[in-house]
């Protein structure tokens, strides 16, 4: 399986809401003892086993708008079709800290998803939608997604920990159980 964290490379982008996909890949790789990150396929890759499945984690370094190039290159090398590709990405239409898994669908204006769809000629890949909330008005969207997480957004680390904890369920194809486990782990006590 190819798990792709969508984001932008560089320290200046590291804590931005748009980079929660990168953060999720880092959390999963750390928790499950994946190999060290190394340059490959126009990005950074780490390998590991989850739920009996070999996972290649990819953080494209092509910037969000050209994510499809890195993903397509990795998928071609691994001889994987879109059903074996998972994109972990920020989602404006979900409340902060919420998560949903879905296969296919539209891009909702997300440039990383749009470029993956362009590269593969279809939208049949899986998505792990990581809610960052909507700023309230479309004119504020760019500043919101490219803004750093604020200190008061205390839900970020618990969500990333929960995603890493539940990741084996996702690898096993237990999508509902994965979502349930993340929801249980992130409930406010």
Image (cartoon, rainbow, N blue to C red):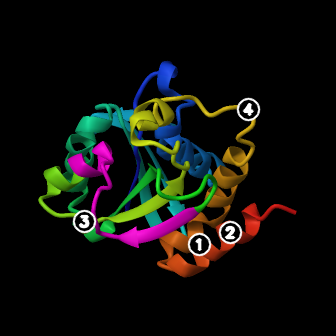
Closest to the camera, between mark 4 and mark 3, is 4
Label 4 vs 3, first from the N-terminus: 3
Residue that numbered label 2 is attached to: 183
Question: Residue 81's x, y, as percent?
Answer: 22, 66
Whole-Å distance between the Cαs marked 3 and 2?
A: 27 Å
Q: Is residue 106 magenta?
A: yes
Q: Are marks 2 and 1 in contact (CB under 8 Å)?
A: yes
Q: Position of residue 26 (x, y in %)?
A: 56, 43
User: In the image shown, does 49 or 6 lie closer to the viewer?
Assistant: 6
Residue beneath the point at 29% across and 51% down: 113
| First of labels 2, 4 by sequence position | 4
Assess whether mark 3 and mark 4 are in contact (beta carbons under 8 angstroms): no
The crowd level at tag 2 (other Cα within 10 Å; few <14, some 14-19, many 20+) is some
> Tag 4's secondary structure?
loop
> Which residue sits at x=77%, y=65%?
187
Quickly name the residue at label 1.
179
Q: Check disc 4: other Cα within 10 Å, few if <14, some if 14-19, many if 20+.
A: few
For disc 4, the marked residue is: 151
Mark 3 or 2, which is nearer the eye? 2
Kindly give the residue lying farthest to the left in the view shown.
Answer: 121
In three-dimensional space, the C-alpha distance between marks 4 and 1, rounded to whole angstroms, equals 25 Å
* Quadrant in which residue 58 is drawn: top left
| Alpha-carbon span between mark 2 and mark 4 | 22 Å
| Residue 77 sits inside the magenta stretch | no
Q: What's the residue at 20%, 55% (across, down)? A: 117
Q: Is residue 180 visible?
A: yes
Which residues lie in the magenta part?
99-115
Question: Disc 2 to disc 1, how far (Cα)?
Answer: 6 Å
């Amino acid at each position: 399986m190819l798990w792709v964290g969508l984001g932008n490379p560089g320290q200046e982008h590291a804590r931005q809401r748009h980079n929660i996909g990168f953060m999720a890949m880092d959390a999963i790789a750390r928790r499950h003892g994946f190999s060290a990150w190394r340059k490959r396929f126009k990005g950074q890759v780490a390998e590991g086993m989850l739920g009996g499945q070999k996972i290649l984690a990819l953080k494209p370094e092509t910037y969000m708008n050209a994510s499809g190039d890195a993903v397509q290159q990795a998928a071609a090398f691994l001889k994987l079709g879109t059903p074996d590709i998972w994109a972990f990405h920020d989602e404006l239409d979900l409340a902060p800290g919420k998560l949903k898994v879905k296969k296919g669908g539209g891009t909702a204006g997300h440039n990383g998803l749009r470029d993956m769809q362009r590269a593969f000629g279809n939208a049949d890949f899986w998505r792990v939608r990581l809610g960052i909330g909507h700023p309230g008005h479309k004119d504020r969207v760019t500043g919101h997604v490219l803004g750093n997480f604020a200190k008061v957004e205390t839900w970020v680390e618990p969500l990333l920990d929960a995603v890493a904890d539940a990741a084996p369920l996702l690898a096993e194809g237990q999508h509902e159980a994965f979502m349930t486990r993340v929801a249980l782990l992130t409930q406010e006590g």
